[in-house]
Amino acid sequence: MATHSARSGALFPYPPLFWLPLLLCLIGLVFQFSVCIGDILKSGATPPTPLTAFRVVMMQSLWLALGLGAMSLLARVPTRFWQASAGFWLVLGVLSLLVLFVPGFSKSINYATRWLALPVPGLGQVLLQPSEAFKLITVFWFAWLYSTQKRVWSLWAVGGTALWLLGIVAIERQPDLGTALLIIMVGVGLAYLGGARLSRLMALMVAGVFAVALVLFLPVVKGMLKGEPWEQQRTAYRLQRIIAMMDPWKHQQDVGYQMVRAQLAVGSGGFARLGIGEGREKRYLPAAENDYIFATIAEETGFVGSITVIALMGLVVYHCFRLATQASTRFGQLVGSGLALWIGLSALINIGMAIGLLPTVGLPLPFVSAGGSALLSLMAGLGIAQAVARERG
């Protein structure tokens, strides 16, 4: 009892969920720095100023500091607060996603409208991605749903779940199908762990598969109706990426370019090497500091370095599940499980994308990829996990 009391009084009563993510964040900063060096060394590149060249690393360091601050603060907030306010955060999350469709409030990059642009003195525009916070809100919502609702859901529970589905549709329309699918998987996984009937979940999953197929083949239908090539439709790239995944080398001049470069980077790392900063493929790989950071790690540290990152990520997932088994409340159990699903599925999809098993979907590698909204949301989630640990019986 004395040991538990001492641990409960600590800032982070579950240390592995502090040190492991922090180590992954530091690894991420090292390789983001390496990508910045690669950008400077690109042939024909105009020599940038230090502030411009290393902006990614400096911004990620700032986000890490903010994330650690949020984690420290939220570790002291009782979990009953999050349980009682889950509906509020759901409404706020959906509103933030809908605001993106209001002209003047959002920023579009590469035809995707996923960011709220906030002017910050000295830093220029700081971009926030509401869909990253919606991942954490999904954990809140389903943890509340399956810890407080009885066999027959209340009208509020049904309405809230419909609102959650509206958020999913808003994310898909950004367009960001990869994030929408990840959030659905986390929600379905939490529903299963929460005790939902397997037959109902299977029926929902079948309906979901048909819905995704419809979304993927919609450009083909539009092309037929308009008498235009389906490849010219707005979201045709989704189906093109799946086709390219089957044989990326055949499409290496267009939609398969990222896949080929990523596989070249992973394959060139060999078994073990220490060549941080020496990678070549990262200079030509789009989003090497974000979506394809794992390819950069594999190229510069080989199989050994890649397995080390995977093992650290696996330990984070393991400790989230372990914390879930120790939680004193049903809500705490589901929060721990939801974090494990969120981190584990994100890592699997990102790594599968880097090694060519999955098409490019634009999901970051947790803690390692550059991206302030993603990191801040993850660290906030781990702060709540520390609060769950503090309340263990």
Image (cartoon, grey):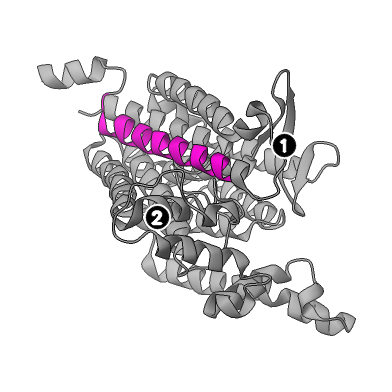
| Residues packed near mark 1 inside 10 Å, few (<14), some (14 to 19) or many (20 plus) | many
Q: Decide: marks 2, 1 in contact (CB < 8 A)?
A: no
312 sits to left or right of 66: left
- Closer to the camera, 179 or 79? 179
Task: Look at the image and give the residue range highlighted in magenta.
Answer: 13-38
Separation of marks 2 and 1 at Cα, in angstroms: 32 Å
Q: Nearer the viewer, residue 205 or 176?
A: 176
Image point (52%, 45%), residue name: 135
Residue that mark 2 sits on: 298
Q: Is residue 376 left or right of residue 254?
A: left
Q: Is residue 74 magenta?
A: no
Q: Secondary structure at mark 2?
A: helix
Q: Quadrant of the C terminus?
A: top left
Q: Position of residue 356 (x, y in %)?
A: 47, 69
Instruction: Give amino acid for label 1.
Output: Leu
Amino acid marked by disc 2: Ala
